Amino acid sequence: MVSKIRVLLGMLVLLALAIGAIALLAAVKAAPLWFTIVPLGILFIGASVIRSLGWFTKKAGG
């Protein structure tokens, strides 16, 4: 099992990016639909990328 701290840190980084995207969308007065699509996209695609990079998998021999 992978370290819970590593997963928590990865997801907190993605959450911070999603909140930043919401602030940016609010600043440019984007349509309400984008406030749902962009943050969820950041969370789901970001988690997939982090997983594919090996952050959420345990290292062999560790």
Image: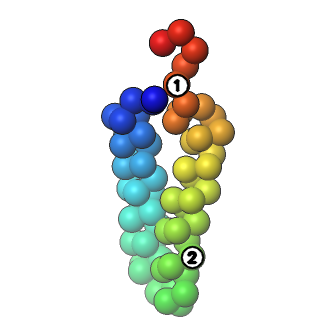
Name the residue at 52% across, 68% down: 40
Q: Is residue 27 above or below residue 61?
A: below
Q: Residue 3 appears in which quarter of the rendering? A: top left
Counting from the top left corner in percent of width and height, residue 44 is at 57, 59
Q: Going by the picture, which residue comes out furthest to the front?
A: 1
- Residue located 57% across and 42% down the image: 50
Q: How many marks?
A: 2
Residue found at the very far top of the displayed protein: 61
Q: Residue 46 or 34: which is nearer the viewer?
A: 46
Q: Is residue 5 above or below residue 20?
A: above
Write down the quadrant of residue 33 in the picture.
bottom right
Comparing 51 with 27, the one in front is 51
Say which label, 2 or 1, has the lower sequence index.
2
Foreground label between 2 and 1: 1
- The answer to which quarter of the image holds residue 34 is bottom right
The foreground one among 40 and 60 is: 60
Quarter of the image containing the N terminus? top left
Q: Is residue 46 above or below residue 10?
A: below
Q: Amino acid at mark 2?
A: Ile
Q: Secondary structure at mark 1?
A: loop
In three-dimensional space, the C-alpha distance between marks 2 and 1, rounded to whole angstroms, equals 31 Å
Instruction: Tell me where residue 22 appears, x and y as whole percent.
Output: 43, 72
Say which residue label 2 marks. 37
Left or right, 31 with respect to 8, comes to right
Name the amino acid, label 1: Lys
Q: Is residue 52 above or below residue 42?
A: above
Classify 10 Å Cα crowding around label 1: few (below 14), some (14-19), many (20 and above): few
Q: Residue 58's mark?
A: 1
Indicate which disc residue 38 carries.
Answer: none
Q: Position of residue 9 (x, y in %)?
A: 37, 40
Crowding at dot 2, Cα within 10 Å, few <14 / some 14-19 / many 20+, comes out as: few
Q: Residue at x 37, y 49 (%)?
A: 12
